[in-house]
Structure formats: C-alpha cells, structure tokens
Image (cartoon, helix red, strand yellow):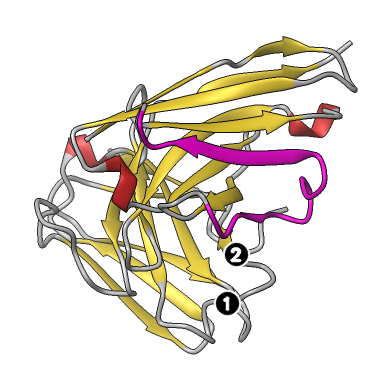
C-alpha cells in the first residue's frame, strides 16, 4: 500500500478536463510545498509534469496544472488529448527520515 | 539527458546483484542522483540517494543495511549494490536525476530485478 492515496482510474473525453487527487498526511503533502506529478506512458520513461505543487517544467503544456489544499494535492488536465492516456503518479517530500513518498498511481483513460 | 540502467536479472533470495546507470547529456558530476523502484502493479518507491560528490548517501528503511549506492563521476555512472535480496525486492529499478527542486526531473527506462527461487 502506497503512502499517498490516488484514485485507481479516471476517464474523460477529448477536450474535457479531469482532476486526479493525491491524499497524504501533515507529514508529507500537508507539511511541505514539495509535491510533484509524473506521467508514465506505455513504453516510455516516467516524465516530470509538475513540481513544487504547481510549477511546470519547460516543455510541459499549460493544460497541466497542480494545486494543494491541506493534505490533498491535485493534478488537473484540461483540454484532454488522446496522447495524455497513461499512468500518473504523485510524490511528496516527507522529511528527513522518510524522504520521498509516492502515490499508487492513477490510470487516465481518454475515451 | 539520457539515463541507461543495466544489471537487472533473475536472482535467488539471499543473492546479490549490482545495478549500473550510465548518464549522458548533462554534467553528471554536479547532480544528486537517486534509485526508485516499482513493483508490478504498485506505485513507485524511493530507494536511495547519493550526493554529487558521492557523499551523503540515504536509504529507505526497507533496504537499509542491505543496499549500497555509489558513483564514479569519471565514468558518469551510478551503482546500486544489492545484497541479501528478498522476494519483495522484485521490481523495475529506475535511475533518476534530482531536479534540485525536491523532485525528479529525468528517469531512465528501468531495469528489471526478479528475486525468486
């Protein structure tokens, strides 16, 4: 069982928006502003999509956005595209003894 | 940026294995590096970190005392020495670059470790 809780799956149609939640505790998500999100497409290496809760690395479309409220972080993908289909994982820094924790992953299906 | 892992395979419980990660496309000697693993059907799990000069290693509790991490900056290569392997160590092991922003900005394709009798 992963430290952070994500829904197993979400789905949406092309052009729609979806939000993936990531729930932790005050020792990880709630305690630091260091939540990141990763996209893992079949046959590819995982890719950083969001860091520091809401920042996008260069090259990541602004259709991807992140936010956090208390112990829950969220990834929103607007204007869904077929190529967005894959697995998404959240991650949070959790302090000196635990370091980094991940979510169990959410499978995004674009119908 | 490219990270290429190797060294995975099938090993019996109690056995040892050394993973390698060859980096290219960036100044390897200036970046902290990590190993992250992912068991079949599960989320990723952070395993270990090493600072840019090879000091300041850290390990997840689940591997502490059994795994060691090292690097050779002259060869742009990082290693993960895994001893006393257990069935629960079975996973894809990823070499990952530290983004310097408490996240991981580049991942390799992973190498599969299967611990089974």
Q: In which chain is the residue bearing label 2?
A: A
Q: In which chain is the residue bearing label 1?
A: A
Q: Earlier in the sequence, mark 2 or mark 1?
A: 2
Dot 2 and dot 1 residues touching (CB under 8 Å): yes
In this rendering, the answer to whether A30 lies above or below B59 is below
Compute the Cα span from label 2 to label 1. 9 Å
Q: Position of residue B84 (x, y in %)?
A: 86, 29
Determine the secondary structure under disc 2. Answer: loop
Q: Is residue B68 left or right of residue A77?
A: right
The stretch drawn in magenta includes residue B51: no
Q: Which quadrant would the C terminus of chain A be assigned to in this image?
A: top left
The stretch drawn in magenta includes residue B65: yes
Q: Is residue B110 visible?
A: no
Residue at left offset 54%, top offset 86%:
A31
Residue at left offset 63%, top offset 75%:
A96
Q: Residues within 10 Å of mark 2 (few under 14, many from 20)?
A: many
Determine the secondary structure under disc 1. Answer: loop
Residue at left offset 50%, top offset 49%:
B54
Residue at image mark 2: A4
Q: Position of residue A61 (x, y in %)?
A: 10, 55
Q: Nearer the viewer, residue B25 or B95?
A: B25
* Range of residues picked out in magenta: B55-74
Q: Position of residue B116 (x, y in %)?
A: 83, 15
Q: Is residue B57 left or right of residue A15?
A: right
Residue at left offset 66%, top offset 62%:
A3
Q: Nearer the viewer, residue B39 or B24?
A: B24
Q: Quadrant of residue A109?
A: top left
Q: Position of residue A39 (x, y in %)?
A: 34, 45
Main secondary structure of the magenta stretch = loop
Which of labels 2 and 1 is toward the front? 1
Residue at image mark 1: A28
Q: How many marks?
A: 2
């Amino acid at each position: 069982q992963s430290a952070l809780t994500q829904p197993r799956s979400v789905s949406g149609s092309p052009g729609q928006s979806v939000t993936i939640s990531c729930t932790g505790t005050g020792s990880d998500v709630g305690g630091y502003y260091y939540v990141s999100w990763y996209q893992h497409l079949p046959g590819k290496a995982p890719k950083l999509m969001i860091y520091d809760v809401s920042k996008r690395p260069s090259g990541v479309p602004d259709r991807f956005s992140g936010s956090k409220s208390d112990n829950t972080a969220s990834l929103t993908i607007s204007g869904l595209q077929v190529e967005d289909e894959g697995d998404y994982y959240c991650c949070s820094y959790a302090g000196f003894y635990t370091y980094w924790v991940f979510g169990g992953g959410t499978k995004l299906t674009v119908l | 940026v490219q990270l290429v892992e190797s060294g995975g395979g099938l090993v019996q419980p109690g056995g040892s294995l050394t993973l390698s990660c060859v980096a290219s496309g960036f100044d390897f000697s200036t970046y902290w590096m990590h190993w992250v693993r992912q068991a079949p059907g599960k989320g990723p799990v952070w395993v270990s970190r090493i600072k840019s000069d090879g000091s300041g290693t850290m390990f997840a509790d689940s591997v502490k005392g059994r795994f060691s991490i090292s690097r050779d900056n002259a060869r742009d290569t990082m290693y993960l020495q895994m001893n006393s392997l257990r069935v629960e160590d079975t996973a894809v092991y990823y070499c990952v670059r530290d983004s310097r922003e408490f996240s991981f900005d580049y991942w390799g394709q992973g190498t599969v470790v299967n611990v089974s009798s």
